[in-house]
Image: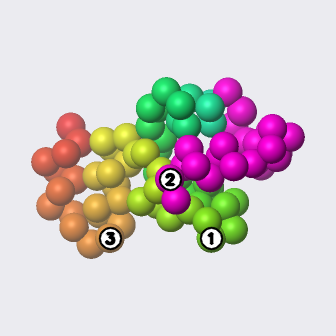
Amino acid sequence: MDFKTFYTSKPVNERESFAQQAGTTRGHCNQIAFAGRKVDLGMADVFVALSGGALTIDDIPLTDRANAQRAIREGAPHQMAASVV
């Protein structure tokens, strides 16, 4: 399930609660869901944790830097130097 599907399946009051628990705003979540905004790895981790297993890191649009950090986390450190300046 992608972030947009997950987020929009919630009633508006639950979207607000989800955003607050994540330390962000509903507007920011809307930008991620509808406007193609990408997030850093820390915020993606929070979304995954708060989703109760509905989301994985693959379901969230990551910034280029977050993708490079993720590659390092998963054991591919050579990608960091090529991806992030």
Q: Specify whether residue 23 is in view.
A: no
Above or below — where is 32 with respect to 54?
above
Above or below — where is 60 with respect to 72?
above
Q: Where is residue 80 in the image (x, y as percent from the top left)?
A: 22, 53
Residue topped by disc 2: 2
Quarter of the image for the C terminus: give it: top left
Query: Which class describes the residues within 10 Å of circle 3: few (<14), some (14-19), or many (20+)?
Result: few
Does dot 3 land on a helix, a strand or a loop? Answer: loop
Amino acid, disc 1: Gly
Q: Which residue is drawn at 63% across and 36% down?
A: 29
Asked whether, in this view, residue 59 is left or right of residue 31, the answer is: left
Q: Report the number of numbered marks.
A: 3
Q: Position of residue 56 (x, y in %)?
A: 50, 64
Above or below — where is 32 with respect to 40?
above
What whole-number distance in Å separates the C-alpha atoms at marks 1 and 2?
12 Å
Residue topped by disc 1: 53
Q: Residue at x 33, y 43 (%)?
A: 65
Magenta highlight range: 1-27
Q: Which residue is drawn at 17% across and 56% down?
A: 79
Query: Which class describes the residues within 10 Å of circle 2: few (<14), some (14-19), or many (20+)?
Result: some
What whole-number distance in Å separates the C-alpha atoms at marks 2 and 3?
21 Å
6 is within the stretch colored magenta = yes
Amino acid, disc 2: Asp
Residue topped by disc 3: 74
Asked whether, in this view, residue 74 is left or right of residue 12, the answer is: left
Q: Which of marks 2 and 3 is in front?
A: 2
Q: Is the magenta stretch mostly helix, strand or loop?
A: helix
For marks 2 and 3, the one nearer the N-term is: 2
Amino acid, disc 3: Glu
Q: Where is residue 7 in the image (x, y as percent from the top left)?
A: 65, 46
Does dot 2 land on a helix, a strand or a loop? Answer: loop
